Image (cartoon, helix red, strand yellow):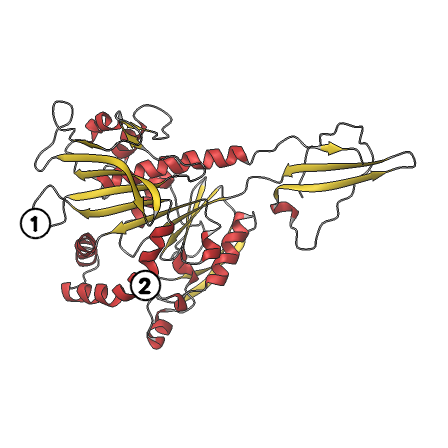
Amino acid sequence: MAICTVYTTQPFNSTCSISTPTKTHLPSFNQKQVVFFSSSRKSSKRAVITCSAGEQTVVIGLAADSGCGKSTFMRRLTSVFGGAAEPPKGGNPDSNTLISDTTTVICLDDYHSLDRTGRKEKGVTALDPRANDFDLMYEQVKAIKDGIAVEKPIYNHVTGLLDPPETIKPPKILVIEGLHPMFDERVRELLDFSIYLDISNEVKFAWKIQRDMAERGHSLESIKASIEARKPDFDAFIDPQKQYADAVIEVLPTQLIPDDNEGKVLRVRLIMKEGVEFFSPVYLFDEGSTISWIPCGRKLTCSYPGIKFSYGPDTYFGQEVSVLEMDGQFDRLDELIYVESHLSNLSTKFYGEVTQQMLKHADFPGSNNGTGLFQTIVGLKIRDLFEQIAASRAKTPVEATKA
């Protein structure tokens, strides 16, 4: 039951009743107008009341192909808000959901409409929209955003089967991560902020070899076959989503080493869309200028091939963006504070918070290059965005008028 404090300019002591449409769920409304009527023999009063039934969930979308760093990004993001993200206690041990004090991360693989055998029989991959239930995805993300718990399905990555559902309660922040968070327009419109991890083919291949050969025992031939089999669907259904993202982290081969094929040194670009509500791009030295900076020297140790930063305005799919780029890798993370001191609009709570977060997770993949740096920065920007949205949705004084 929603309890609202009522402010009126006239005495309003009579018993009030609320008449609402049958589809209105009072426990989930936020900043809605409710009209109270009071009548007596002497007068009739009308009060238009704006109130809140609680915090509406902020929804973040993270899109990327398999093996492109979504899990690492989620760990960095949830760390910014404090507390470790863990699977639901007492639930399915193969659940894909991660829950912390502030955030809930759900994997959109849970909305596969076909299990592994079903996809094989129909000749489709998990990237194909026909293998996913976008109607259910939209309905459940919308319900959670509106403050309503749902019974979300579970796709079991171990067995390849669709397991019985699990209860997801509305958190302060819901992160939907996977292949298709921006594919369906209805789901896309529910997002308060969206990120796309854009890994170049060369880097993706190197990463998948490292992960699938070292960690999963796959052969080089099977990895190549898997990538080639997925590429048409990736190009058709996953890659186009980046045009809708508010921020894109683009990972490319370095330009500091001619003809580099190892993929150990990376060039990473943080592409930030201009004009996004509650989000302002990070900049280097002077906002809106075009800058190239080599920070190596007395305050930053750099071994071969060094480090180079770039910043400037650009366009991306016809939209105005700001782009911050880092090529190379850090030798000493404790010296990152020198770079941090030259970046502005980081949305940090205190001086050196970016460096602190990077040192805290120095063992995470990408901590010595731009992937870790930009994931950390985006995490801090999302925290700031959440706080701004929460403040904007705070309860406001109620307007009362005399009928």
Q: Which is more toward the observer, 77 or 183?
A: 183
Q: Counting residues from the N terminus, which is met first, the one under dot 2 or under dot 1? A: 2
For the point 31% across and 29% down, the residue is 287
Q: Amino acid at mark 2?
A: Ala
Q: Residue at x 15, y 27 (%)?
A: 300
- Tag 1: residue type? Asp
Q: Tag 1's secondary structure?
A: loop
Q: Position of residue 335 (x, y in %)?
A: 19, 27
The label number, if any, that marks residue 259 in the structure image: 1
Quick check: 220 left or right of 277? Answer: left
Contact (Cβ within 8 Å) of mark 2 with mark 1? no
Answer few, some or many: residues within 10 Å of disc 2's Cα (few below 14, many 20 plus, some between 14 and 19).
Answer: few
User: How far is mark 2 from mark 1, CA to CA?
Assistant: 29 Å
Residue 116: name its quadrant: bottom left
- Could you say where residue 190 lies in the image, as x and y percent from the top left? 49, 50
Would you name the residue on which mark 2 appears? 236
**Of helix, strand and loop, which one carries label 2?**
helix
Res 364 visible: no
- Between 155 and 310, the residue placed more toward the observer is 310
Q: Is residue 182 left or right of residue 216?
A: right
Residue 248's x, y, as percent?
31, 46
At which x and y percent is residue 359?
25, 32
The residue sitting at 22% across, 25% down in the picture is 338
The answer to whether any part of residue 58 appears in the image is yes
